Image: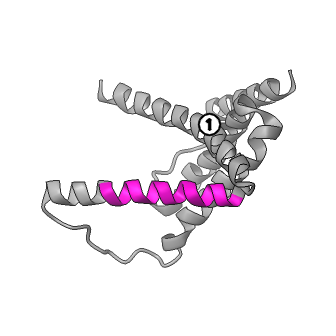
Amino acid sequence: MTQLLWSLLGIVSGALIAFQAPINTQLGRGLGMPIAAACISFLAGTLVLIIATAVMTRMQGTAPTFRAPAPWLFVAGGLLGAVYVTTSILLIPRLGAAALMAFLVAGQLLASMFLDRIGFLGLAVREISMGRIMGALLLLSGALMIRFT
């Protein structure tokens, strides 16, 4: 049952991303600059996460502890997120919401298969099986069908 709930949470999270792209695109149109929209989006997210961190710290009775990760990890996630959000803002008017989401998911799957295969940053190593290859090809085919039909 727990695995089903985690899976459903992943689906809900993915659905929220589908809303995020057109919302940010409208913000970019209103501001006249897509990068400014990405900046405001990150600022809003930052504020929510600051509040959530404060609430969780209060509930747990302990503050986050610093465990010195690799220095590049301090900026890598934010940089990758900035590229993702800005690219989504630029692409959604050109591709449409469904095609953009299909290509994003296809890209995520292909990269994730590689990251699993090499055990990136301590991920459990998972072989690239024929089933995974076929699933990725079906997903990529579906993305192309959504875009070009």
Using the image as rendered, state which of residue 134 and residue 89 is in the foreground. 89
Q: Residue furthest left?
A: 61
Residue at the location (58% across, 51% down)? 117
Q: Residue furthest front?
A: 30
Task: Please state the extent of the stretch shown in magenta in the rendering.
Answer: 35-51
In the image: residue 125, left or right of residue 106: left
Q: Is residue 40 above or below residue 116?
A: below
Question: Can you tell which quarter of the image residue 108 is in?
Answer: top right
Q: Is residue 124 above or below residue 132?
A: below
Magenta highlight on residue 40: yes
State the quadrant of the C terminus. Answer: top right
In the image: residue 21, left or right of residue 65: right
Residue at the location (29% across, 59% down)? 53
User: Label 1: which residue?
Assistant: 129
Q: Is residue 121 above or below residue 89?
A: below
**Where does residue 5 sit, x and y in percent of width and height?**
35, 28
Q: Amino acid at mark 1?
A: Ser
Question: Can you tell which quarter of the image residue 78 is in?
Answer: bottom right
Provide the secondary structure element on which disc 1 rests.
loop
Question: Can you tell which quarter of the image residue 63 is in?
Answer: bottom left
**Where does residue 2 sit, x and y in percent of width and height?**
30, 29
Residue at the location (58% across, 35% down)? 19
Here the colouring is one colour
State the quadrant of the N terminus. Answer: top left
Residue 80, can we see it? yes
